[in-house]
């Protein structure tokens, strides 16, 4: 090859490519250069491919290998890039949060007073804030607690009348309003218990009002033999409950009226806001049983199902409870039966059935006394509490008895709260 041809080729390679040729992929035409007289050589200028062209070729080649279109490959790469960026962002954010929490913990660490004493009192004053600063920086009370305190339980209207001649206190439960809904349907089945503290010997109950949050009672109860001097040491309690046949009755709230703070010489009629119930340490427990009466056969069947939350009677904090069922008429015991003894438990389960023969003409003249007793092998067994049903019962006990008579041959089960046993009751 002639020196002239070599020079031309070298110059062609080193010459800069015009910007116009970067956008075009057309190969420039061949030129005939005469090396010798009568001969010509076709010379084709080789332009190096641009970066964009090489990326496009590689992308197309990878797409061909994966049997997909190039735009599909680009979409996949973009999606992977977005995912990777998201993961990196989350990791960076998490590390930043950890660093902030560590810095906060370092700031909360206390100061070693021994080392501070070595540095002198001046340094101690710098690191230990004054009490005034601590008071100013004290945390505000929780919003949840304030909301609980502000929760409204409703209000109760009642009337009090005291008769100085007969030493009797007449209490009228008039009505309640804005009670909270405790049932699934958005209502309640409220009733009111009325008693005097501290003795609680005599309790009265209103009728149950179904599915209402503003019941009207208008029921009057009389506490007899309450001298004025003794009344000044007593507190009148109105306890409102939500009736539930198959579980323990939930207490909605209560109103306590210390009689020393009211003028019994005048008739008192007022509204009071219901207050939440504080822990009741004197609860005796609850018992569940069913009643079934068959008029044609004259048979009364009592099934003792279970009891729960019984009062602790033993030293070890438990009890050995059994249930005693007595059929009474005119103060005389006609028949008595007992369940088995359940050892060391406050929540015994019995499911034991007992049948009494009671003719139809006598069913309205008898009482059923169900007593939970703590068995004692050495000493005397002590009654924990009792439930009295029958013609002279009241409240939920009377309702259970009435439901049994209204549904012959059907067992009617219900929970009852145990009441204080009578002092004169015989102990087994």
Image (tube, rainbow, N blue to C red):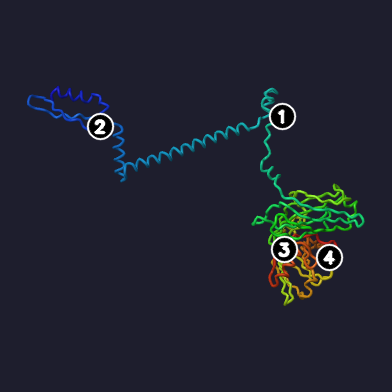
Which label belongs to residue 426?
4
- Between the C-alphas of marks 2 and 1, the distance is 81 Å
Q: How many marks?
A: 4
**Reading the chain from its start, which is encountered first: label 4 or label 3?**
3
Write the residue at 29% across / 43% down: 64
Which label belongs to residue 24?
2
Q: Verify CB contact (< 8 Å) between mark 2 and mark 1.
A: no
Q: Nearer the viewer, mark 2 or mark 1?
A: 2
Write the residue at 72% across / 74% down: 294
- Between the C-alphas of marks 4 and 1, the distance is 66 Å
Report the side of 395 relative to 48 (left or right): right
- Between the C-alphas of marks 2 and 3, the distance is 101 Å
| Residue at the left extreme of this rendering | 38
Q: Nearer the viewer, mark 2 or mark 4?
A: 2
**Reading the chain from its start, which is encountered first: label 4 or label 1?**
1
Label 3: few (<14), some or many (≥20) within 10 Å? some
Which label belongs to residue 342?
3
Of residues 390 and 128, which is closer to you in this image?
Answer: 390
**Reading the chain from its start, which is encountered first: label 1 or label 3?**
1
Secondary structure, mark 3, is: loop
**Reading the chain from its start, which is encountered first: label 2 or label 3?**
2
- Between the C-alphas of marks 4 and 3, the distance is 21 Å
Q: Position of residue 387 (x, y in %)?
A: 77, 63
**Reading the chain from its start, which is encountered first: label 2 or label 1?**
2
């Amino acid at each position: 090859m002639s020196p002239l041809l070599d020079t031309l080729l070298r110059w062609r390679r080193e010459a800069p490519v015009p910007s116009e040729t970067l956008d075009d992929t057309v190969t420039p035409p061949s030129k005939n250069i005469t090396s010798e007289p009568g001969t010509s050589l076709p010379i084709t200028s080789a332009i190096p491919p641009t970066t964009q062209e090489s990326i496009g070729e590689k992308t197309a080649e990878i797409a061909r290998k994966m049997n997909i279109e190039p735009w599909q490959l680009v979409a996949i790469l973009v999606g992977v890039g977005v995912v990777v960026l998201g993961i990196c962002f989350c990791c960076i954010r998490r590390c930043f949060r950890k660093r902030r929490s560590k810095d906060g913990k370092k700031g909360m660490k206390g100061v070693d007073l021994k080392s501070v004493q070595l540095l002198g009192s001046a340094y101690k004053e710098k690191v230990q804030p004054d009490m005034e600063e601590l008071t100013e920086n004290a945390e505000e009370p929780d919003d949840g607690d304030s909301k609980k305190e502000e929760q409204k339980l409703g209000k109760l209207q009642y009337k009090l009348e005291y008769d100085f001649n007969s030493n009797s206190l007449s209490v009228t439960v008039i009505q309640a309003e804005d009670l909270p809904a405790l049932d699934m349907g958005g209502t309640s089945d409220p009733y009111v218990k009325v008693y005097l503290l501290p003795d609680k010997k005599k309790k009265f109950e209103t009728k149950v009002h179904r599915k209402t949050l503003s019941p009207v009672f208008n029921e009057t109860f009389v506490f007899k033999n309450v001298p004025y001097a003794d009344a000044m040491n007593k507190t009148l309690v109105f306890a409102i409950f939500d009736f539930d046949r198959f579980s323990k009755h939930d207490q909605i709230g209560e109103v306590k009226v210390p009689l020393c703070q009211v003028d019994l010489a005048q008739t008192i009629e007022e509204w009071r806001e219901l207050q939440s119930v504080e822990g009741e340490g004197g609860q005796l427990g609850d018992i569940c049983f069913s009643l079934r009466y068959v008029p044609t056969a004259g048979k009364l069947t009592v099934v003792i199902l279970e009891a729960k939350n019984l009062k602790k009677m033993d030293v070890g904090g438990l009890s050995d409870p059994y249930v005693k069922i007595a059929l009474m008429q005119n103060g005389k015991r006609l028949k008595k039966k007992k369940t088995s003894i359940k050892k060391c438990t406050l929540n015994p389960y019995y499911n034991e059935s007992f049948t009494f023969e009671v003719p139809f003409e006598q069913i309205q003249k008898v009482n059923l006394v169900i007593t939970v007793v703590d068995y004692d092998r050495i000493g005397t067994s002590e009654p924990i509490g009792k439930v009295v049903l029958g013609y002279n019962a009241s409240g939920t006990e009377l309702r259970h008895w009435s439901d049994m008579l209204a549904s012959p041959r059907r067992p009617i089960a219900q929970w009852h709260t145990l009441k204080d046993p009578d002092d004169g009751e015989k102990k087994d």
